[in-house]
Amino acid sequence: MLTLGCLILAAQAGHHAHVPAERPAVVARPANLGPVDVEISLGVRRGQLRYDREFLLIKPGVRARLRLSNVDDMLHNWVLCAVGTDLDALATAALQLGADAMAKDFVPPSDRVLCYAPIVGPSQATFVDFVAPTTSGDYPFVCTLPGHATTMRGVLRVCASGTPIAALRYRCYEGAFERLPDFDGMTAVKAGDLTDGLIDVGVAARDRDFALVFEGSLDVVAAGLQRFHLDSDDGARVLIDGAVVVERDGVHPAGQEKTGDIELERGAHALRVEFFQRKGDRVLRLAWSNAAGRRMGLTHDGQTDAASRQELFVLQEAIVQRAFVEGGPERAIAVGLPGGVSACFDAERCCVAFAWRGGFLDVAPDRLARGGQACRIVGQRFAANATRTPPQIDGESGAARFLGYRVAPQGPTFSFAVGAHRVEQRLSATDQGGLRSTFAITGEPSPVTLTLAREGLSVSASAGRWEGDVLHLSAAQATEFSVTFEAAR
């Protein structure tokens, strides 16, 4: 049995320790724990039912203090569980506590619960002291208050390095590169260590005409399919154990994330990331989804200064923002939906360009530059109509004409004309964090086709039949139908 020393303390005066006797895996410690080896700060995303960090790292056996701060309008807790715990079943058990739920912080008696931070109210904070597990692995955590567990969860990774990438080093080269060079035989102008285990293009201390090579070791704690997510401005390549996993070479803007998969055994694997910057924005973003599908960022965002962020938050009602969006079309309309999903609508082509999960927009580039700069998306991007085409109506030709939009609390409706037909496209979020487009077409009933690139996505329609990437709808079916996009996991 895993032994985990744990003490729950509240930042508010008068809150008592929570170490139920039903949990043999939890060992109470004296109130005077003394100094800890590491402190972890964890918050929540206001109105999004998400923690602000969904992947935490820690070394085995260290004494830790996790501080949970709540800037939300709702109550939250934090429950750390054993590897492989069914979080949905745990949340159901919390609901079954009934009238005792609040007194027990919505934490059911279970030997799967290793420790927990008690319920914390709006604008308050709490903390939990614990000794990290001694066995490496991915330990899930969750908020067990009613309705929160679906999205408010994450992973505490226990690994020997205690950093995303162990023994991470960089080498910097100068040159006006147009593609990734052959680094063999080239002479670096400088090199060094990155002790926090995160890739950082800022080490070049230049805005253009340079290249970087990063090398380190990834600690894979669960064997299986690993996915790497890459976005860059300009070229970048990711190699694991010498094999290319994902590449985005050449001079191009950021905003088109590519993914690559590789099967890896448990243990240490050599990671190499190559990057060059010609001119323009300096961006390199790399994330890693482990075999359980949990995503962890491996890079500092070379464009983002936390002190200059101006992030727009979506609460209970949708937000529509007319602004330039990174990687978006010239006539972009950004849509933030309740539930943690956002979309970029192309008012020129009259269709959704792409979507993303997480936050909404950081508008600092636009506002601090007094207009004209692209706002940053906050989250992980996925395709949602990669072909960038509206519905094609039988007998109609010519480009669609944008007519405007109206906003409702759960999402906006965009109106456009295709020939003599009027199309209304309503956007809303799914319970799983995907995007749903609901179409209503008026005019002479006609068959409709919609072409979608479905690779890497889970795409479903309420009506019609698929032929490859083409959805065919009869005249009767096309009066009203919906298409749902979920990011592949």
Image: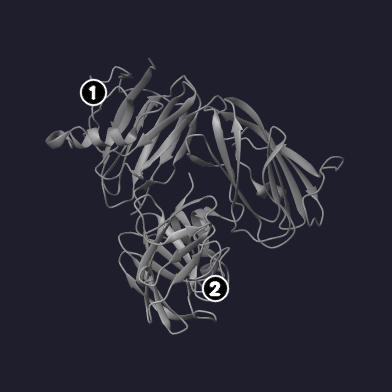
Q: Residue furthest bottom?
A: 420
Residue 140 x/y as whole percent: 40, 33
Instruction: Determine whether the residue tagged by mark 1 lies in a helix, strand or loop.
Output: loop
Q: Earlier in the sequence, mark 2 or mark 1?
A: 1
Residue 139 x/y as whole percent: 42, 29
Q: Is residue 438 left or right of residue 470?
A: left
In this rendered view, identify the residue nearer to me: 324 or 487. 487
In this rendered view, identify the residue nearer to me: 448 or 308. 448
Label 1 crowding class (10 Å Cα cut-off): few <14, some 14-19, many 20+? some
In this rendered view, identify the residue nearer to me: 346 or 377. 346
Residue 67, compared with residue 418, is above or below; it is above
Which residue type carries mark 2? Arg
Camera-side mark, 2 or 1:
1
Numbered circles on residues, count:
2
Q: Residue at x 32, y 64 (%)?
A: 410
Which residue type carries mark 1? Pro
Instruction: Determine whether the residue tagged by mark 2 lies in a helix, strand or loop.
Output: loop
Q: Residue furthest right?
A: 185
The reply to whether residue 346 is visible in this rendering is yes
Residue 335 x/y as whole percent: 42, 65
Answer whether labels 2 and 1 touch (C-beta < 8 Å): no
* C-alpha separation, residue under disc 2 versus residue under disc 1: 55 Å
Residue 122 x/y as whole percent: 27, 49
Q: Which residue is mark 1?
A: 20
Residue 261, compared with residue 337, is above or below; it is above
Q: Residue at x 37, y 49 (%)?
A: 432
**Quarter of the view holding residue 479:** bottom left
**Quarter of the view holding residue 14:** top left
Q: Which residue is mark 2?
A: 370
Q: Is residue 404 left or right of residue 103?
A: right
Residue 31, compared with residue 399, is above or below; it is above
Q: Residue furthest left?
A: 99
